[in-house]
Image: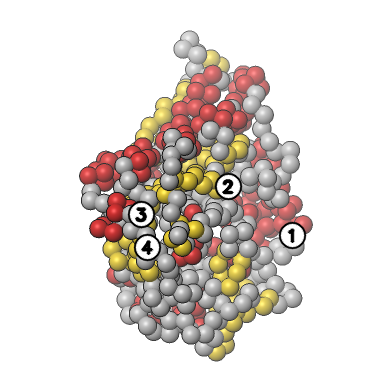
């Protein structure tokens, strides 16, 4: 349930057994990987693996894909900058026409030239109803895209979609390769060709993705010549492999990262994020669909304790998808930890405690399962803390671990410890999370949330070009979630990374939920330089 990940809430997760088995694999960097200390190579451990490397099917839609470039990109301060476009777009006064002048002399990694026709092909193919892209609704505003000449592209919008330029970080693919194959099943998904700084050399499913520097890269060949992403779902296994020297760096939960704080030769990086953890409260479950249960859980949970104890202070309480320090946050929608009020809400709604302390109403026991991703320590700890707080209010939550293959079929009835968040615009955060007609569409609207006032505000926020009107729309959404919380938002999580301290140029961005391939201190690995 994200607005920007490869598979909604996250990319496809692997079973814990696969992650543990990966410890027995050979050094993921090969002979010149982390173990040998090669100055021009790097191996990092990430938690999630993509379904596909084809942008037409959703890969890299939020930028930093390494293999591809978008028309625009985001810099370290999250400002838009030109990439395949030579400059930022020219926008018409009515906000409905965006004109991009393209960078000349750019080639794909196979040597063929990049032109405006590749841009037109990319966007029109994604919008084709036959293309299996779960995020095509994010481009709903596009009425047409045309090539004015080989180096100029014009987008015409149906309405003045304010964050449209941010959507054009989407990677561009080569028409000359993809037009000859089925975009849904062709081999481009595993043998991609792009204009980006790296080329894929190997993808061992469940183990690693290996890249080499693109000598044709228009921005100059990267100094890190070989870059490997080891797929290690289990947090503890990732930390173990980092300590063993099998990895140069990894994303880790704050508590595990703290164990590396005093080690020479390593450096810790903390990235602020829009990444939240939330509990879905499906409307089709007799307990989680009950308004009193939802409202009671919203104040029964101790968010600050989660930040302090689970995140080791690396985060903040979450009251919705928008972080409290965002200019889009609606002041006054914070929820105070109030167990007494939770009890009162349930008592007044007729949920009475039984002999075992668990509440019952009309023969229905206040009990439900809560699933979390196996091997994800942060989700497990959040789930356990949430269940503990709920138990004090008389609600019995059984926490269960599983893979997404196990969890996804159960999402209509069972609660899930989910994640999401995107920093560019509130539309990116909220539309797929809350729109009622997206319920049941993969990982979109996992709670099957249905609120007509929220639906109207989502459309108002998406279609208005006026910032004040948009702010009013997103304030409405946050206040409606206060009245009828279809999710219990818990925390916004800072991402913590530990890396070997042997390169220059490492920074972090404000990160989305989808971390690993797209984010981390390696978001700009093409700019790293070895330390002297």
Residue 454 pos. (x, y %)? 64, 49
Residue 29's quadrant in the figure? bottom left
**Distance between the Cα atoms at labels 2 and 3?**
23 Å
Q: Is residue 476 above or below residue 303?
A: below
Looking at the rendered structure, the secondary structure element under dot 3 is strand
Q: Which of the two labelled residues, at mark 4 and mark 2, occupies the earlier sequence position?
A: 4
The alpha-carbon separation of the residues under discs 4 and 2 comes to 28 Å
Residue 455 on image: x %, y %: 62, 52
Residue at the spot 55% in from the left edge and 48% down from the top edge = 271
Task: Give the position of the C terminus as an image quadrant.
Answer: bottom left
Few, some or many residues within 10 Å of mark 3 (<14, 14–19, 20+) = many
The residue wearing badge 1 is 467
Tags 4 and 3 touching, CB below 8 Å: no
| Mark 1 or 3, closer to the camera | 3
Where's residue 45, x and y in %? 37, 49
Q: Secondary structure at mark 1?
A: helix
Identify the residue position indicated by label 2 in the image.
272
Residue matched to label 3: 43
């Amino acid at each position: 349930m994200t607005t920007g990940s490869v598979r909604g809430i996250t990319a496809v997760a692997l079973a814990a057994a696969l992650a543990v088995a990966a410890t027995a694999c050979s050094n993921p960097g090969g002979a010149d990987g982390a173990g040998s200390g090669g100055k021009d190579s790097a191996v990092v451990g990430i938690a999630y693996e993509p379904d596909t490397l084809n942008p037409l099917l959703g890969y890299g839609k939020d930028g930093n894909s390494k293999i591809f470039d978008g028309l625009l990109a985001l810099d370290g301060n999250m400002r838009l900058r030109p990439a395949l476009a030579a400059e930022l777009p020219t926008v018409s006064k009515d906000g409905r026409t965006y004109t991009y002048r393209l960078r000349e002399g750019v080639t794909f990694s196979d040597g063929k030239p990049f032109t405006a026709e590749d841009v037109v092909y990319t966007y029109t193919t994604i919008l084709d109803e036959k293309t299996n892209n779960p995020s095509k609704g994010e481009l709903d505003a596009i009425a047409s895209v045309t090539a004015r000449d080989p180096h100029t592209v014009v987008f015409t919008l149906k309405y003045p979609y304010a964050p449209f330029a941010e959507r054009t970080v989407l990677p561009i693919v080569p028409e000359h390769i993809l037009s000859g194959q089925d975009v849904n099943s062709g081999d481009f998904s595993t043998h991609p060709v792009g204009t980006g700084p790296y080329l894929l050399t190997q993808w061992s499913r469940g183990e690693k993705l290996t890249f080499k520097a693109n000598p044709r890269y228009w921005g100059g060949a990267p100094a890190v010549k070989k870059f490997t992403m080891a797929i290690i779902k289990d947090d503890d296994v990732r930390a173990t492999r980092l300590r063993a020297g099998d990895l140069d760096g990894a994303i880790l939960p704050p508590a595990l990262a703290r164990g590396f704080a005093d080690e020479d030769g390593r450096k810790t990086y903390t990235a602020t994020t829009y990444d939240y953890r939330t509990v879905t409260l499906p409307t089709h479950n007799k307990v989680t669909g009950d308004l009193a249960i939802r409202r009671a859980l919203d104040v029964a949970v101790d968010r600050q304790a989660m930040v302090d104890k689970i995140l080791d202070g690396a985060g903040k309480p979450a009251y919705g998808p928008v972080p409290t320090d965002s200019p889009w946050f609606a002041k006054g929608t914070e929820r105070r930890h109030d167990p007494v009020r939770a009890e009162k809400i349930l008592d007044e709604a007729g949920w009475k405690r039984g002999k075992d302390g668990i509440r019952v109403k009309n023969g229905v026991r206040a009990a439900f399962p809560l699933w979390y991703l196996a091997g994800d320590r942060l989700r497990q700890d959040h789930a356990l803390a949430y269940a503990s707080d709920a138990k004090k209010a008389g609600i019995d939550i059984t926490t269960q671990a599983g893979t997404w293959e196990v969890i996804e079929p159960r999402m209509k009835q069972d609660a899930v410890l989910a994640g999401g968040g995107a920093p560019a615009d509130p539309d990116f955060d909220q539309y797929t999370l809350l729109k009622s007609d997206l319920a049941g569409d993969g990982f979109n609207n996992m709670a099957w949330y249905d609120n007509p006032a929220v639906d109207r505000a989502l459309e108002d926020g998406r279609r208005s070009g006026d910032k004040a009107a948009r702010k009013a729309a997103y304030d409405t959404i946050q206040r409606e979630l206060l009245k009828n919380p279809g999710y219990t938002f818990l925390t916004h999580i800072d991402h913590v990374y530990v890396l070997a301290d042997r390169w220059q140029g490492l920074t972090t961005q404000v990160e989305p939920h989808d971390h690993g391939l797209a984010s981390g201190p390696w978001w700009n690995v093409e700019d790293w330089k070895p330390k002297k």
